[in-house]
């Protein structure tokens, strides 16, 4: 009779330890961008873009292909064009340069010339590479600059870089900086050259490499410790990363310690529950 009572008491204790804890809620969507990140202004359209040194231009004269040229604005802000000689471009918009070329070509050279100017290389345009890179800062955007090249220019990711790269499109951001349009890119695949589709980078875009986020596994697992958090990491995956259960693990009494609104709380966890950054997964020891 005593043995049966002790066994019954043990069952109550084991079951009660789980029942006393609330179930683990879904992870809160955590922004990977720092709260103090200041986004640059939206880029201007090409027609209103202000030209500067080293900008590449394609100048087309309708019905006069022999006068069409590709030029680069020199350090003094000008370029040389057939018939009319030196043309000052720095400080002008694309539309203003078209008007200037039209005026000068019509002055004794062509009848009602139709001039089109296209920017082929935005040497004056800048992008921002920030976060866990060795040399964060402002970098020049060329027409064919890739995301990988920009990260390389910034010295590459640091040792504590996370698993993703975030591209914030300045052309789509709201003035309040809310609901930012993010392009998420797998950093490891990007560095390995496994991403075939090019990632469009525009003027004033921000490329942000977040620091790695972690969760913790303690208790009756083979390798307790800290582990990198990937997207949609479940309790099952966390235990697998930690080498699996020991033979003393209480597999039905898994707990997760999570800070919510700056208050540490404890929850009962199931294998398919998802973890978030800084979660502590605890695998208790079995009573017998």
Image: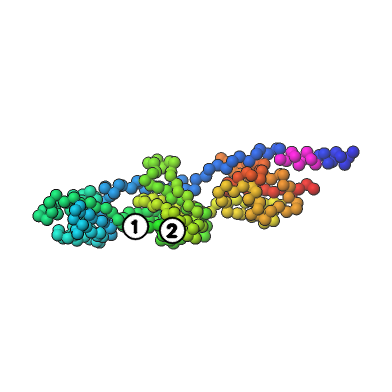
Front residue of this view, candidates 206 and 38: 206
Image coordinates for residue 264, horizontal then vertical, percent: 61, 43
Image coordinates for residue 220, horizontal then vertical, percent: 71, 52
Question: How many numbered circles does the render carry?
Answer: 2
11 part of magenta stretch: yes
281 part of magenta stretch: no
The residue shown at (35%, 46%) is 42
Of pointers 2 and 1, the one earlier in the residue sequence? 1
Please state if 173 lies on the left or on the right of 79 as rendered: right
User: Which residue position is annotated with label 1?
Assistant: 142
User: Which residue position is annotated with label 2?
Assistant: 148
Magenta segment boundaries in residue numbering: 10-18
Judge whether residue 132 can be spotted in this image: no
Disc 1 crowd rating (10 Å Cα; few below 14, some 14-19, many 20+) is: many
**Gap between marks 2 and 1 measured at Cα:** 13 Å
The residue shown at (51%, 57%) is 188
Front residue of this view, candidates 41 and 62: 62
């Amino acid at each position: 009779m005593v043995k049966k009572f002790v066994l019954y008491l043990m069952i109550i204790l084991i079951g009660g330890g789980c029942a006393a804890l609330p179930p683990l809620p879904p992870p809160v969507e955590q922004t990977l961008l720092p709260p103090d990140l200041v986004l640059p202004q939206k880029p201007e359209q090409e027609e209103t873009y202000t030209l500067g040194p080293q900008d590449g231009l394609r100048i087309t004269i309708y019905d006069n292909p022999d006068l069409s040229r590709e030029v680069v604005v020199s350090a003094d802000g000008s370029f040389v064009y057939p018939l009319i000689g030196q043309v000052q471009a720095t400080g002008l918009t694309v539309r203003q340069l078209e008007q200037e070329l039209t005026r000068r070509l019509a002055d004794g050279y062509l009848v009602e010339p139709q001039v089109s100017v296209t920017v082929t290389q935005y040497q004056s345009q800048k992008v921002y590479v920030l976060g866990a890179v060795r040399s964060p800062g402002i970098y020049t955007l060329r027409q064919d600059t890739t995301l990988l090249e920009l990260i390389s220019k910034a010295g590459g990711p640091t040792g504590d870089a996370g698993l993703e790269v975030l591209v914030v499109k300045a052309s789509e951001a709201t003035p309040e900086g809310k609901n930012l349009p993010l392009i998420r890119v797998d950093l490891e695949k990007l560095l390995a050259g496994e991403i075939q589709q090019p990632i469009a980078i525009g003027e004033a875009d921000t490329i942000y490499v977040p620091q790695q986020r972690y969760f913790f596994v303690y208790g009756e697992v083979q390798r307790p410790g800290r582990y990198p958090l990937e997207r949609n990491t479940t309790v099952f995956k966390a235990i697998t990363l930690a080498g699996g259960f020991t033979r003393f693990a209480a597999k039905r009494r898994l707990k997760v310690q999570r800070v919510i609104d700056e208050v540490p709380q404890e929850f009962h966890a199931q294998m398919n529950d998802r973890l978030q950054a800084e979660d502590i997964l605890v695998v208790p020891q079995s009573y017998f």
